[in-house]
Amino acid sequence: MAQEGGVLTEAQLQALEKAKSQREAHGEIETQHPGYLGAQDTYYVGNIKGIGRIYQQTFIDTYSRVAVAKVYTEKNALIAAKMLNEQGIALLRILTVRGTAFCGKKESHTFELYLNIEDIEHTRPQAYSPQRQTASVKGFTRQ
């Protein structure tokens, strides 16, 4: 604990610096203009009798916070690429989860091929970490 005069020990200062750097590394997403960074995710909506499973594809431009959501009866890389292509803005980066619709071999996965053709950098959260990076998309899909 800090001494009563408000002076911190060396160990406490080091712990505060470490916590600060971790917050900065996992804090808010930096975005500078429309198209600088988009976030995309798929959400399972439910099952409709006579139609089957329903999935929501969501895209958000992180600068303008404009969001688009569409529902589909499938969840795959082709639909994810189609959704991204329909946005009509030139993207520099896209942030997705590590799901099969978004990740695969760069030379054969439909979504990865689309990103390569359009020269869009693909950012994914660290494996087995809380997916705070896609929180804006997750929050939108559950409202």
Image (cartoon, rainbow, N blue to C red):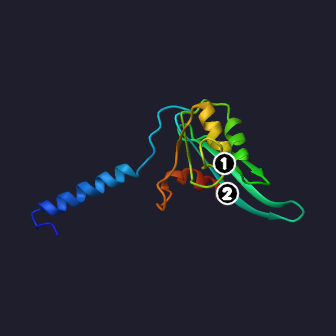
Q: Quadrant of residue 109?
A: top right
Between disc 1 and disc 2, whose residue precedes? 2
Please give the residue where the numbered disc 1 appears in the rendered image: 58
Q: Nearer the viewer, residue 132 or 142?
A: 132
Give the residue type at disc 1: Thr
Q: Position of residue 2 (x, y in %)?
A: 15, 66
How far across and down, in percent of the image, does residue 74 sit? Answer: 77, 54
Query: Observer-nearest residue: 79 or 72?
Result: 79
What amino acid is at disc 2? Tyr
Tell me: 61 left or right of 26.
right
At 49% from the left edge and 55% from the top edge, which residue is drawn?
Answer: 132
Q: Which residue is mark 2?
A: 43
Quadrant into which the N terminus falls: bottom left
Task: Tell me if I can see residue 8 in this picture.
Answer: no
Which residue corresponds to the image point at 57% horizontal and 54% vertical from the top-left?
A: 98
The secondary structure type at the circle numbered 1 is strand
Residue neighbourhood size for the residue with mark 1, other residues' Cα within 10 Å, grouped as few (<14), some (14–19), many (≥20): many
Q: Is residue 26 visible?
A: yes
Q: Nearer the viewer, residue 35 or 143?
A: 35
Q: Quadrant of residue 75?
A: bottom right
Q: Residue 110: give its label.
A: none
Whole-number angstrom distance, CA of label 1 to CA of label 2: 8 Å
Residue 113 % position (x, y)? 64, 38
Quarter containing the C terminus: bottom right
Dot 2: what SS? strand
Q: Is residue 112 above or below residue 45?
A: above
Q: For the image shown, how many numbered marks are present on the structure?
A: 2
Q: Residues within 10 Å of mark 2 (few under 14, many from 20)?
A: some
Task: Answer above or below: position of 103 versus 89.
Answer: below
In x, y percent, where is residue 12?
18, 62
- Determine the residue positioned at 73% across, 46% down: 79
Quick check: marks 1 and 2 in contact, CB under 8 Å?
yes
